[in-house]
Image: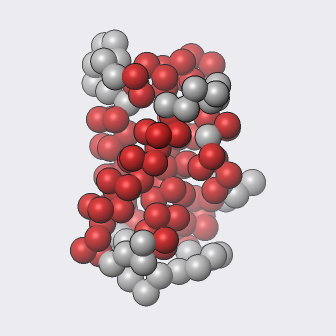
Amino acid sequence: KSFQELLWKQEGDRSLWEYPFAVAGVNITFMLIQMLDLEAVKPRTLVGATFLKFLAENESAFDLLYCITFKLLDHEWLAMRASYMDFNAVMKATRRQLETELLQEDITCLEELPSYGLLSR
């Protein structure tokens, strides 16, 4: 449901200038690969190690994190009243927020992330 809302902009506040949906998806994929250190055999970062724990518990963890990240990007885009030229700044803000949430000590699964609440159920 969240994916359809993002794709078709069916609900919520919309900005005057939207980000290109496909470009956002590709950028989110590469950002997550870097941030989670997925190209390494063993994660070299705390964020990557944390995600590996979530993945061990839930084989759909990457899919869920991807959806959370996309909704977070959309939220940041609207909050920053961004235009196409602000895309990189929005991506950086999204990554910072996601890293902060993943490194919270009391988080034991992705469903406990504050940004999980952005998903439609």
* Image position of 110 with respect to 67: above or below: above
11 or 118: nearer the eye?
A: 118
| Residue drawn at the location 30% of the way across and 18% of the way down | 44
Q: Coloured how? A: secondary structure
| Residue drawn at the location 37% of the way across and 75% of the way down | 82
| Residue drawn at the location 63% of the way across and 76% of the way down | 12
Quadrant containing the C terminus is: bottom right
101 or 26: nearer the eye?
A: 101
Quadrant in the picture for residue 34:
top left
Coordinates of residue 43 in the picture (x, y in percent) = 35, 18
Taking the image as shown, residue 51 lies to the left or right of residue 26, namely: right
- Residue farthest to the front? 105
Residue 98 appears in the figure: yes
Quadrant containing the N terminus is: bottom right
Taking the image as shown, residue 35 lies to the left or right of residue 59, namely: left
- Residue farthest to the top? 42
Quadrant in the picture for residue 106:
top right
Quadrant in the picture for residue 73:
bottom left
- Residue farthest to the bottom? 16
Q: How many marks?
A: 0
Residue 59 appears in the figure: no
| Residue drawn at the location 61% of the way across and 35% of the way down | 110
Taking the image as shown, residue 61 lies to the left or right of residue 42, namely: right
* Image position of 21 with respect to 91: above or below: below
Coordinates of residue 2 in the picture (x, y in percent) = 62, 59
Coordinates of residue 33 in the picture (x, y in percent) = 33, 35
